[in-house]
Image (spheres, helix red, strand yellow):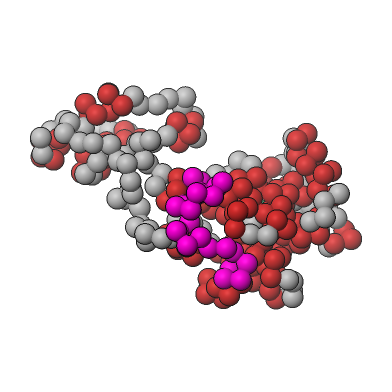
Amino acid sequence: MGPQAAHAHHDKVTSQMTLSERADALEEQMMHDLETVVTKSVLANLMDGRVEMAGGAALQSKYPGKYFNMGADPRLPPMPEKPTLLDYFKNRFASTNHLLQSGALALKNGHSEKVVLACLLHDIAVVSFIRCDHGYWGAQMIAPYVDEEVSEAIRMHQALRFFPDESMGYAYPDMYVKYFGKDYKPEPYIVEEYKRARNSKYYETSRLICVNDIYAFDPNAQVNLEAFEDVIGRNFKQPKEGLGWDNSPSAHMWRTIMWPTRFL
Ligand SMILES: [Fe+2]
Ligand SMILES: [Fe+2]
């Protein structure tokens, strides 16, 4: 069955529909236009507030004559065969300004290349993958490719952000009061992480991420990714197979970001 026949099955977008019905109908229409059936993982549904998944058989009967997507999602920017960290920056990171500005501030403050890299990558989980526990996810993503100082500092910054250290020039962020309310208290596991971080040999590096992690830093300043190519080149071990194809302990995370709608 060709695409024309498949079109007959979907609901038409009409003016009587609510906004969310329209969105669903448009999404469905778009899905019918694709060569393959792209699928949402349960996690994506959980984030929409639903404990749900579509079964394979039911999905396939909705899109007759099509196979499930087992590779690149045609809706996303294509990735090269052997992607580098820079390719992910350009094609998968939803926002890079905060990372580039934090990295630029660390450079300006004269910190070591490891600190600069840690600042540049500290929120990569947020911009490419997941917010919740972003320090842990981000650290795992990069651990095989960077010095332990960089990944450990990134893991710990999530907790350290909630605790001031005046001796290093870090106060509790006003932004957190605005975002979470003045009575917000970090979870006990974050408090424990903070205590461990205080005794870590990478405490200072992690604290420097917090110090350079400033959203208000000149919103008009445009920092180019190119400014960090050398630092990345010297401090990020780019796998020759391409990031995601290298069988490192976190390669699957990069593949998931590259091809997020594979059926399996
Ligand atoms: Fe962060
Ligand atoms: Fe940040």
Residue 141 visible (yes or no): yes
Where residue 65 appears, x then y in whole percent? 16, 33
Where residue 162 appears, x then y in whole percent? 77, 47
Q: Where's the C terminus, which quadrant? A: top left
Magenta residues span 232-254
Q: Quadrant of residue 180?
A: top right
Where residue 101 appears, x then y in whole percent? 62, 67
Number of numbered discs visible in the structure rendering: 0
| Picture layout, residue 147 above or below residue 136 | below
123 left or right of 46? right
Residue at 24% x, 29% y is: 60
159 left or right of 37? right
107 left or right of 43? right
Q: Nearer the viewer, residue 49 or 52?
A: 52
Provide the major secondary structure of the magenta segment: loop
**Residue placed farthest to the right in the image?**
167
| Picture layout, residue 68 above or below residue 160 | above
Residue at 70% x, 76% y is: 108
Asked if residue 244 is among those painted magenta in the image, a careful observer would answer yes
Asked if residue 168 is among those painted magenta in the image, a careful observer would answer no
Q: Nearer the viewer, residue 194 or 81?
A: 81
| Picture layout, residue 138 above or below residue 1 | below
Residue at 62% x, 63% y is: 120
